Amino acid sequence: MFKRMLLVLLGLGPCGLSAAEAPAAGAESERAAFAAAAAQFEGSLAFQQGEVKLPNGIATLQIPAGFRYLDPPQAQRVLEDAWGNPDGKGTLGMIFPSDGPVIGDGGWGVVITYEEDGHVSDADADKIDYNELLTDMQKSLGEQNKERRDQGYAAIELVGWAARPHYDKAERKLYWAKELKFGDAAHNTLNYNIRILGRKGVLVLNAVSGMQELSKVEQDMRQVLAFANFTPGNRYQDFDGGVDKVAAYGLGALVAGGIAAKTGLLAKLLVLLLAFKKAIVLGAVAVAGVVGKLLFGRKDQAN
């Protein structure tokens, strides 16, 4: 299940890596091998542009020239074979900028999922105090970090908003970004979130990169926001109160943590994030394994 994968992506297991982190310092041959493997892997991917109907038919993407889309099987290859996550199933695909690598410095992607928890009311849109919400989220995460440390994992600090939450009531689209710090990492992490409200649920788009790429990611994600839309019959305005389920949470809970928040568990907010793929620097042995997989292909996983 994709939600289990997210736990791994959040630092509860192996993460992917960048070209700069992969080889040991000064090992030019390893750097060259990694770069060649990354290029070979990316060349094997079947990217799409133009109109893309997502697998469940609830939404379409109009992918322009500056972006490229991978369907779920291709996205699974990226998440598992390139980024080192054990379970990449359950997405609706991924979106990447056309001018950035899938693997390497400056590379990032948008993971697409759909949460059919019911029609989310936006009645609280003008009442949410996002400063207060941020404080509550930071407190809850601080409480969760004790358990993370006890289990041997680095603490995660929610530094603040990288982009303050904004809701477009006409388009029923919500976006925000958080700045996160993983343990003693030298650079902070950017987690950029888009939620598009629909008739029966929410289209979820999550992107993660370094904070140094904020301006680029923010610019690109605004475009992603514009070209992702529900199909007729699945739009927010298609809601039928006599038939359709209503979600147990509103916009504030989406920002605080979505599914976890509907049960009041703000401490679980990070379950819904795609964690920074550089959160854990892998050792040379792990690096060799990833490069080997990219060079010689994935092992059979039919069991």
Image (cartoon, rainbow, N blue to C red):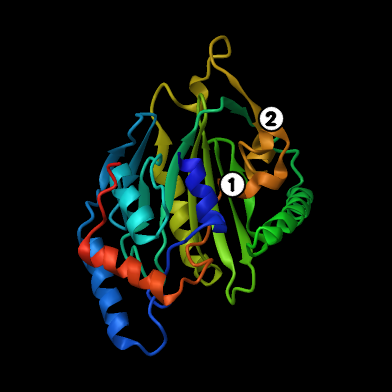
Q: Residue at x 58, y 14 (%)?
A: 241
Q: Which residue is mark 1?
A: 271
Q: Is residue 25 left or right of residue 250?
A: left
Quadrant for the C terminus in the image: top left
Q: Is residue 75 left or right of residue 190?
A: left
Q: Which residue is mark 2?
A: 123
Q: Residue at x 51, y 27 (%)?
A: 236
The CA span between labels 1 and 2 is: 25 Å
Q: Residues within 10 Å of mark 1 (few under 14, many from 20)?
A: many
Extreme-bottom residue of the structure: 26
Q: Quadrant of residue 28?
A: bottom left
Q: Is residue 33 left or right of residue 188?
A: left
Whole-percent x, y for residue 227 in the image: 39, 44
Q: Earlier in the sequence, mark 1 or mark 2?
A: 2
Camera-nearest residue between 207 and 288: 288
Q: Residue at x 43, y 52 (%)?
A: 110
52 in relation to 119, above or below: below
Number of numbered discs: 2
Quadrant for the N terminus in the image: top left
**Marks 1 and 2: CB-CB under 8 Å?**
no
301 in relation to 298, above or below: above
Q: Amino acid at mark 1?
A: Val
Whole-percent x, y for residue 297 in the image: 22, 59
**Res. 18 in view:** no
Q: Amino acid at mark 2?
A: Ala
- Checking the image for residue 254, the label placed there is none
Q: Name the element at disc 2.
A: loop
Q: Is residue 185 left or right of residue 293?
A: right
